[in-house]
Amino acid sequence: MTYLMCLFMLGLVFGLVAVASNPSPYFAALGLVVVSGLGCGILVGHGGSFLSLVLFLIYLGGMLVVFAYSAALAAEPFPESWGDRSVVVYVMGYSLVVGLVGGWFWLGWYEASWGTVDELQGMAIVAADTAGVAVMYSTGGVMLVVCAWVLLLTLFVVLELTRGLTRGALRAV
């Protein structure tokens, strides 16, 4: 399980580098979906399976809105992909920065800090996140409804902005 968490962390860091270095919004939105999936995988490994599911569904809804908005605003016939020269230069630069920062803080990491919930818990009757579900619905239920309402409102705003050439806020100049 520790190797899987290390793989998720490495994929998360490289996915963030890919999102930061890509100028095209199409591939950046795809990278954000992959990074959110890896982040939710890290949460599952540390005992938050229900929280990970809720966050992933919210992230997918948000990324759908972001992708629709970026696809409407950036109508590129040939977007720059991850294999182009400028993107590769940015990836190398960001990877160098991540490597230098990781080397600087390397002595502060210990192997015991990589343990997951299931490895350290032993034989428990209750899973690690079942108490958190009740707390999230009792004290955080209002926030879940507010977040869902904001995402729905954002979707309608994006659809209104990109409705057509004759109506809506975006027109061909």
Image (cartoon, rainbow, N blue to C red):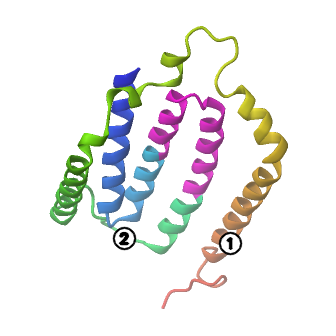
Give the mark nearest the N terminus, 1 or 2.
Answer: 2
Horizontal and vertical percent position of residue 142: 83, 53
Would you name the residue on which mark 2 appears? 76
Q: Residue at x 58, y 48 (%)?
A: 60
Horizontal and vertical percent position of residue 1: 41, 20
Residue 138 versus residue 17: which sits nearer the camera?
A: 138
Quarter holding residue 134: top right
Gap in angstroms between the C-alphas marked 1 and 2:
22 Å
Judge whether residue 37 is colored magenta. Answer: yes
Horizontal and vertical percent position of residue 59: 58, 50
Magenta span: predominant SS is helix
Considering every residue shown, the one lying at the far bottom of the view is: 173
- Left or right position of 164 against 19: right
Q: Residue at x 48, y 66 (%)?
A: 71
The vertical placement of 153 against 9, above or below, is below
Label 2 element class = loop
- Left or right position of 171 against 24: right
- Left or right position of 14 against 103: right
User: Residue flagged by tag 2: what amino acid is it?
Assistant: Glu
- Left or right position of 40 against 166: left
Horizontal and vertical percent position of residue 145: 80, 53
Q: Mark 2: few, some, or many residues within 10 Å (few <14, many ≥20)?
A: few
User: Residue flagged by tag 1: what amino acid is it?
Assistant: Val
Give the extent of the magenta segment.
36-64
**What number is the disc on residue 69?**
none
Would you name the residue on which mark 1 appears? 157
Considering every residue shown, the one lying at the far front of the view is: 108
Residue 107 versus residue 49: which sits nearer the camera?
A: 107
